Every structure is written in C-alpha cells, then in structure tokens.
Amino acid sequence: MRYYKPIEIAKELNISTSALRHYEDWGVIPKPARAENGYRLYTKVHLAYFRCLRALFPGFGVGITCDVLRHIQNAEVDKAFWIVNHEQAKLQHEKMVADQTLALLQDPELPLIPNKKLKSHMTIGEVAALTDVQDSAIRHWEKEGLISPLRDPENGYRIFTSMHIRQILLIRTLRRTVYFLENMKEIVQAVEHHSIEKAKKVTEDALISINQRNRQQFRGVQQLVELCDVLELID
C-alpha cells in the first residue's frame, strides 16, 4: 500500500501540515494509522478526503463540508448528497432573486411580483409574504437604517410601498455578498432617490459572485463523487 507523508499532501493542497492535523481533530478525516516512529500513515483514502474537503470549502462553507464528510465516514451517502443538493437549491433561489432584482432595477415598469397586483400601501406581513423574507428580518433592516417605511398616523403601523419592496429585494440579494452595512445603506437608499445605476452595478457584481459560487460547488461535488468512488460507496 502506498503511504503519503503529511508534507506531500500539504504541498499538493497548498496548506500547512498543521492544517491536516486540525482537520483530523475536527473528526472529518478518518484517523490514520501510525508508524513505529509515530508518524501518520496517510493512504489514498485520506488523500481523497483531504481533496474533497478543500474542494467543498469554497462553495459550501466549513459547517456544511464537515456535516457532509461525517456522513460519508458513516457510509451515509444519500444523507450527504441531499445536504449538498439542498445547498445548491438555496443558491439557485439566490440566483432567481438576484435576476429578479436586476430586472426590476433596469426596468421600473416591470411588475414587482409576477402575477401579483400590488396595493399602493402594504403591511409588513403582506410585504414579507410577497418577498419571501421574514418580517423579523425586515424589522432588523429598518433598525439598521437600510429601509424607512412610512407610519400610519392613526395607529403607528408600518406602511410599505412598491419602492420598499424593491429595496427589500435588493437587500436580500446583497446580504450574501461582501458588502458591509454602511455600503449597503448607500446602495439601498439610492433606490429611494431614483439613482439606481450604482445599485444595478452592485447587483450585477452579486450575480457574478453567485455564478462563481455555483462553479465552486460543482468542483466540490466532483471531488465528493471521486471520494465516494475511492470508498466504493456508489455504483
């Protein structure tokens, strides 16, 4: 059997040997056997695990990657694959929202919600249902100064207009990007002042980021399948 030195695997993956030990401590890599001198004896199985782990990280994040690999160690292939599938479906939904947001910014005459006739004034519950955003999130964004709904002078209830829906959809697209709160405020408020060129540019950048993550996810899935092949877990 071919054994790999930690430095060989670390060099291939462009990481440190201490990182290999950390992954082992996390429980996402099978414990290797030890030589008489105490050195770890990594095999092709360990190499496949390390390759998969490093490939999954960019597209799925540390938490999901660890969950997936723990299931693989237990030979629970379907559980692992469905976790990955769920994350890909979430990314597909992000893409749909980003596309919708960009279309609305490019053409204000488009209906905000397809096949839905909007009222001129809406409650927070109605807006939450229309945008598929939790009302608690909308309140949080208001608290952070991202949106400023009107208030009913009689009862103090929040009143939302079509402009607020555009802002909520934009925030929903941007919150998974690298933009900080202060940058988001400027961009979202630009919609309120009908100055949307910057908002369009940022939304286009968000779509680029989503496309990149999609490619990263597929690279991760490729390595996951290769790991399962090495382990003979799938036909």
Image (spheres, rainbow, N blue to C red):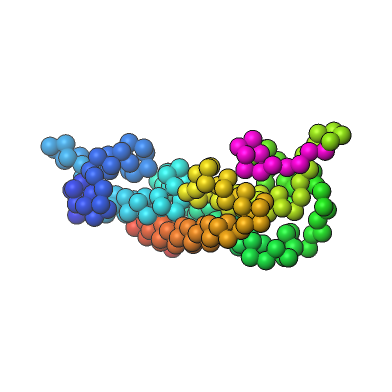
Residue 179 lies, in percent from the top left, at 50, 48
Is any part of residue 33 visible from this angle? no
Q: Quadrant of the N terminus?
A: bottom left
Question: Which of these two is toward me, 145 or 116?
Answer: 145
Residue at left offset 58%, top offset 61%: 197
Residue 65 lies, in percent from the top left, at 43, 47
Residue 61 lies, in percent from the top left, at 44, 47
Given the current orientation, which residue lies at the most extreme left position?
A: 37
Residue at left offset 82%, top offset 59%: 117
Q: Quadrant of the C terminus?
A: bottom left
Viewed as shown, does residue 196 lie left or right of 176?
A: right
Q: Is residue 9 magenta?
A: no
- Vertical relation: 201 (above or below) 5: below
Question: Which of these two is toward me, 125 or 165?
Answer: 165
Viewed as shown, does residue 129 lie left or right of 4?
A: right
Residue 189 lies, in percent from the top left, at 62, 48
Viewed as shown, does residue 158 lie left or right of 45?
A: right
Is any part of residue 146 visible from this angle? yes
Question: Which of these two is toward me, 120 or 137?
Answer: 120
- Magenta segment boundaries in residue numbering: 142-152
Question: Which of these two is toward me, 31 or 193?
Answer: 193
Q: Main secondary structure of the magenta part?
A: loop
Q: Is residue 147 magenta?
A: yes
Given the current orientation, which residue lies at the most extreme top position?
A: 155
